[in-house]
Amino acid sequence: MIECFRIDGDRLLLNIKAVPGSSRTEFAGVNNNRLRIRIAAAAEDGKANSELIDFLARSSGCAKKEIILQLGKRSRLKTISLPVSVRQKLEELAIKG
Protein backbone atom coordinates (compact mmCIF):
# COMPACT_ATOMS: atom_id res chain seq x y z
CA MET A 1 0.00 0.00 0.00
CA ILE A 2 1.23 3.50 -0.80
CA GLU A 3 2.25 5.41 2.35
CA CYS A 4 -0.35 8.16 1.88
CA PHE A 5 -3.16 5.63 2.49
CA ARG A 6 -4.23 4.26 5.90
CA ILE A 7 -7.10 1.95 6.72
CA ASP A 8 -9.29 2.72 9.73
CA GLY A 9 -12.07 0.14 10.00
CA ASP A 10 -14.15 0.37 6.83
CA ARG A 11 -12.69 3.76 5.87
CA LEU A 12 -9.62 4.67 3.84
CA LEU A 13 -7.78 7.73 5.13
CA LEU A 14 -5.93 9.55 2.39
CA ASN A 15 -3.26 12.18 3.10
CA ILE A 16 -3.26 14.80 0.37
CA LYS A 17 -1.26 17.85 -0.58
CA ALA A 18 -3.62 20.01 -2.62
CA VAL A 19 -2.22 22.42 -5.21
CA PRO A 20 -5.05 24.84 -6.04
CA GLY A 21 -5.03 27.23 -8.99
CA SER A 22 -3.68 24.66 -11.45
CA SER A 23 -4.70 24.56 -15.10
CA ARG A 24 -6.47 21.22 -14.61
CA THR A 25 -7.39 18.81 -11.83
CA GLU A 26 -5.18 15.72 -11.81
CA PHE A 27 -3.08 13.37 -9.71
CA ALA A 28 0.53 14.57 -9.49
CA GLY A 29 2.32 11.68 -7.76
CA VAL A 30 3.25 10.99 -4.15
CA ASN A 31 5.68 13.12 -2.15
CA ASN A 32 6.45 13.07 1.60
CA ASN A 33 3.75 10.45 2.24
CA ARG A 34 1.08 12.63 0.65
CA LEU A 35 -0.77 12.22 -2.61
CA ARG A 36 -0.34 15.45 -4.58
CA ILE A 37 -3.43 16.57 -6.44
CA ARG A 38 -3.44 19.63 -8.69
CA ILE A 39 -6.79 21.40 -8.49
CA ALA A 40 -8.27 23.60 -11.21
CA ALA A 41 -10.01 25.91 -8.76
CA ALA A 42 -8.97 28.80 -6.60
CA ALA A 43 -8.47 28.35 -2.86
CA GLU A 44 -11.30 30.71 -1.96
CA ASP A 45 -14.79 30.17 -0.57
CA GLY A 46 -14.31 26.38 -0.52
CA LYS A 47 -14.04 26.12 -4.32
CA ALA A 48 -10.83 24.05 -4.24
CA ASN A 49 -12.22 21.70 -1.58
CA SER A 50 -15.38 21.22 -3.63
CA GLU A 51 -13.39 20.49 -6.78
CA LEU A 52 -11.16 18.08 -4.85
CA ILE A 53 -14.16 16.10 -3.58
CA ASP A 54 -15.77 16.10 -7.04
CA PHE A 55 -12.50 14.86 -8.57
CA LEU A 56 -12.07 12.09 -5.99
CA ALA A 57 -15.68 10.98 -6.50
CA ARG A 58 -15.25 10.85 -10.29
CA SER A 59 -11.88 9.07 -10.02
CA SER A 60 -12.89 6.50 -7.41
CA GLY A 61 -16.44 5.85 -8.57
CA CYS A 62 -17.94 6.54 -5.14
CA ALA A 63 -20.61 9.08 -4.28
CA LYS A 64 -19.58 12.54 -3.11
CA LYS A 65 -21.57 12.04 0.09
CA GLU A 66 -19.22 9.16 1.00
CA ILE A 67 -16.15 11.43 0.89
CA ILE A 68 -15.39 13.34 4.08
CA LEU A 69 -12.81 16.09 4.46
CA GLN A 70 -11.58 15.23 7.96
CA LEU A 71 -8.65 17.62 8.35
CA GLY A 72 -7.32 20.63 6.47
CA LYS A 73 -10.36 22.59 5.38
CA ARG A 74 -8.20 25.73 5.13
CA SER A 75 -4.87 24.06 4.48
CA ARG A 76 -3.12 22.50 1.50
CA LEU A 77 -2.40 19.46 3.69
CA LYS A 78 -5.62 17.47 4.00
CA THR A 79 -6.88 14.14 5.26
CA ILE A 80 -9.81 12.69 3.34
CA SER A 81 -11.93 9.72 4.42
CA LEU A 82 -13.38 7.42 1.74
CA PRO A 83 -14.86 3.92 1.66
CA VAL A 84 -12.06 1.34 1.86
CA SER A 85 -13.47 -0.33 -1.26
CA VAL A 86 -11.93 2.38 -3.49
CA ARG A 87 -8.36 1.77 -2.28
CA GLN A 88 -7.09 -0.26 -5.23
CA LYS A 89 -8.50 2.11 -7.85
CA LEU A 90 -7.04 5.20 -6.14
CA GLU A 91 -3.66 3.49 -5.66
CA GLU A 92 -3.50 2.68 -9.38
CA LEU A 93 -4.41 6.26 -10.31
CA ALA A 94 -1.92 7.70 -7.81
CA ILE A 95 0.92 5.62 -9.21
CA LYS A 96 0.11 6.73 -12.78
CA GLY A 97 -0.07 10.39 -11.68
Image (cartoon, helix red, strand yellow):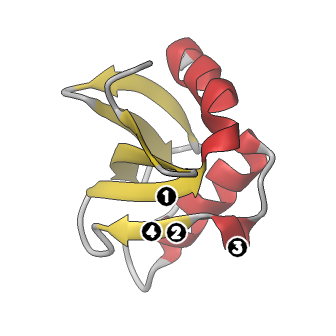
Pointer 1: what residue?
Answer: 81
Q: Which mark is residue 68?
A: 2
Q: Is residue 22 left or right of residue 60?
A: left
47 over 86 or under it: above or below:
below
**Which amino acid type is marked by label 4?**
Leu
Instruction: Give the percent coordinates (x, y) of residue 39.
Output: 49, 51
Q: What SS does tag 4 mark?
A: strand
Instruction: Say whether marks 3 and 4 touch (CB < 8 Å).
Output: no
**Which amino acid type is marked by label 1?**
Ser
For marks 2 and 3, give the CA distance: 7 Å
Residue placed farthest to the front in the image? 9
Pointer 3: what residue?
Answer: 65
For marks 2 and 1, give the CA distance: 5 Å
For marks 3 and 1, give the CA distance: 11 Å
Pointer 4: what residue?
Answer: 69
Label 4 neighbour load within 10 Å: few <14, some 14-19, many 20+: some
Q: What SS does tag 2 mark?
A: strand
For marks 3 and 4, give the CA distance: 11 Å
35 over 67 or under it: above or below:
above
Indicate the quadrant where residue 71 lies. Answer: bottom left
Q: Give the residue at x 32% y 25%.
A: 3
Instruction: Say whether marks 3 and 1 touch (CB < 8 Å).
Output: no
